[in-house]
Amino acid sequence: MDEESQLMQPQDQSCWATLPDVCLQRVFWWLGDRDRSRAALVCRKWNQMMYSADLWRYRTITFSGRPSRVHASEFESALWYVKKFGRYLEHLEIKFLNPYNAVLTKKFQVTMRGLLSSLGKSNNRLKSLSIQHLELDRLVWRNSIRSSFIKSLSFFLKKMGKHLDYLNLKGSRLTVEQGCHVLNSLSYLRNESMASELNIEDFFSHHLAVYSSPQFNKTMATFRNLVSLTLNYNCISDELLENLCENNASTLWTINIKCHIHDPHGQVIWGMSWAKLARYATNLKVNFFFERVMKYERLARILLQEIPVRSISLRSCYFSDPDWSMRPTLLDLLPTFRHTLQKLTFEFNNNHESLDKELHLLILSCRKLFYFKIWAFLDVKFVERILKSQEEGQCALRTLKVRIYTNRYETNEEDRTLREIYRKYRKLIDSELNYFVIAYPMM
């Protein structure tokens, strides 16, 4: 290069001008919509980067139930970008936060109608859709608004059903007829759905005995590729387990089951139905989440020994019943699953009975247990006994989370003892455990 040409080159050209596309794309990925728009005005190269498909594959839109100018501006902006770049979308999450009147639900319904219509026309690659906690049985959802929204969603799922791999409609709270209408949209014109992950926890309203509905079981029979299924226990029946065994045995890995005190859960499920499903779905693991269903008699009807249980969560939500005892569950029921249990979560008010010994024995008996979390009335020394067992190789925990309830406002004594325990086992804790232990006044 001669001297004259060299003079024509910028002497201090910014490194941004020569930044490789892969690096520039990563920079754009971290920017919000407004900053991306401003960056796109810098030069032609940056403008072209704005239209990179990788930037628009994941999208979360939040519709606030408490309107303000800021929220409205952010929402309208997000909506505009989704419509403009909607053809690139692969994963869409929509949140509608705590609407408090019918005006807001109507606005949401109209907005969703336009959004879903636009996506239905421009997008053919959407793999994941999540719309959680709509609570459509609340009074703020008038019948006409609710019906219009369900119609728009069903029409959209009919168009996109063949692409969708993941659908999360947790907390929709529909009637059985409405819920089945939505789910049937996934198998429109094909009589089968190839979705691999389905979350219908609290999809139906409380108090509904969904398990007795032939319509629901017929709908679930259309799913032929399920890997993960999340639902309530009021949906479980022998017929559903038979359908899963017949249509999804080769793919099914996980079933998450929530059992709430207000959901019907007295149905009889035969152990042989679970045994057959476990025999054909060889990789199946079942996770149970109980809320205020704590009595041994109820749990024993649900937790059958034929179920390949991986994790159990028992939460009483601070309610206390002096006639209830956790001891039979810890000594007689849960050890049934000692060969498969990997996670245990307990949150209960046992102020009327000490359970330290029983809990320790349960941990030692479950040789595959790697996660243990408990919020309960415990002696502080319980933590030390668990750590000693861990040190001696009697258990193999990787996570230990303990909240020790006390009947006093002051927890200075417990805090001091916990600090001493931590210092004693610090090397073990730092090298092996995700560890969180605290004393908590339960007044």
Image (spheres, grey):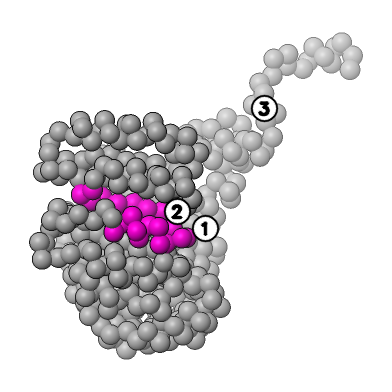
The part of the image, by quadrant, that contains residue 219 is bottom left
Image point (26%, 53%), residue name: 356
For label 3, the SS is helix
For label 2, the SS is loop
Pointer 3 residue:
17
- Which disc is residue 246 wearing? none
12 with respect to 146 (left or right)? right
For the C terminus, the image quarter is: top left
45 with respect to 153 (left or right)? right
Where is residue 330? Give x, y as percent. 29, 64
93 with respect to 69 (left or right)? right
Image point (22%, 71%), residue name: 296
How would you rate the neighbour count of disc 2 (Cα within 10 Å): few for under 14, some for 14-19, many for 20 or more? many
For the N terminus, the image quarter is: top right
Type of residue at label 2?
Cys
Type of residue at label 1?
Glu
Q: Which residues are magenta?
A: 358-378
How would you rate the neighbour count of disc 1 (Cα within 10 Å): few for under 14, some for 14-19, many for 20 or more? many
How would you rate the neighbour count of disc 3 (Cα within 10 Å): few for under 14, some for 14-19, many for 20 or more? few
Instruction: Look at the picture and state if 116 lies above or below 236.
Output: above
Q: Earlier in the sequence, mark 1 or mark 3?
A: 3
Pointer 1 residue:
90
Look at the image and tell me whether residue 66 can be seen. no
Distance (Cα) linking label 3 and label 2? 57 Å
Q: Earlier in the sequence, mark 2 or mark 1?
A: 1
- Which disc is residue 395 wearing? 2
Where is residue 237? Give x, y as percent. 33, 83
